[in-house]
Every structure is written in C-alpha cells, then in structure tokens.
Amino acid sequence: MTDVTMTVNGKTVSGTVEGRTLLVQFLRDSLGLTGTHVGCETSQCGACTIHVDGESVKSCSMLAVQADGASITTIEGLSDGDALHPVQAAFREHHGLQCGFCTPGMIMAATDMIRRHPEGLDEKTVRDELEGNICRCTGYHNIVKAIMAASEAINTASNRAA
C-alpha cells in the first residue's frame, strides 16, 4: 500500500492505494467523483478522460501512484459553481450528447483541444483530435458543432479580455 496526495479540482486529497490501483478507480471509488466514467479500461474509448497537470489523460491508463503530487481536474471541477464551463454550455446548447456516457470524457478532451488551439478549430481538426474518444450514439455531428462553438466563444472572450 502506498500513500498518495494530489490536488483534485482545487482541493488537496490523500489516500492509501495499492500499487495497481488505476487513477480512475481512485477518483471514483475513493473520492466519489463518478463523473469520470469507466468504459473500456483499455484507453480506447476516452470516457475516463481527465486533466493531469493541465493536459488530457485517460485515467484508466494511469496508476494512482503516478498522479502523486499532480493537479487533477475532473468533469466535476470544470464548472465554476453553478456557471457551466463554456464547453459544457456548448454541449447543452448544441445537443452534443444522447445517452451522456461519453460526454464527460468528450468535454474534458475538448477543453484541452481548445487550449492547445487558441487560433481556433476547424471541423477536420476537431474530428481528427476526437479519434480517441468514442461515442456510440450521436454520429459526432453535434459534438463537433458544440466543440467548434465553444472554441469560438472562448477565443472571443479571450480577445475581449486582452
């Protein structure tokens, strides 16, 4: 057993884990953050996508001990209180979901994608970068629309602030 400490959604948390405990298991089972979904457990579907030190990571492919000292953001930590993050708002507005199982991972992947492309996104880039996130319901059309709308809203807000 190993003690781990990390910052999750802005709060310092600690726990004792077995060396083989996946980060997704620690988040869900130990911290009760069930918005991070377990889909394939082979890092193929992206349902478990979170941010580790600001970058997208599939939490089923990382051990909890590897996250010791890291800063983690899950879907629960993305919004600011009752105010949705722009990507969450765009998914709602553009109906970028159906069953919702993949949605947290899609949103987390999208926020990182937008961060890495401050110049904006086109449809091809969005579709290419979503390759590791699987949705079995939507056909991706509204997901892509939502991500592009969120990118535009975030970039417009950034330009106004500058």
Image (cartoon, grey):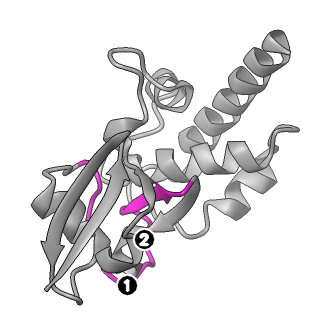
Task: Between residue 68 and residue 94, name the one nearer to us.
Answer: 68
Residue 7 magenta-drawn?
no
Circles 2 and 1 in contact, beta carbons < 8 Å: yes
Horizontally, residue 141 falls left or right of residue 8, namely right
Task: Between residue 80 and residue 109, name the one nearer to us.
Answer: 80
Bin the neighbour count of mark 2 within 10 Å (Cα to Cα): few under 14, some 14-19, many 20 and up: many
Horizontally, residue 109 falls left or right of residue 124, namely left
Question: Mark 1 sits on what residue?
Answer: 42
Could you tell me which residue is drawn at 77 percent across and 47 percent down? 123
> Can you say which quadrant of the picture contains the N terminus?
bottom left
Q: Is residue 66 above or below residue 54?
A: below
**Observer able to see residue 40:** no
Image mark for residue 90? none
Tell me the kind of residue under disc 2. Answer: Cys
Question: Mark 2 sits on what residue?
Answer: 45
Q: Position of residue 148 (x, y in %)?
A: 70, 35
Q: CA distance from mark 2 to mark 1?
A: 8 Å
Could you tell me which residue is drawn at 16 percent across and 65 percent down? 15
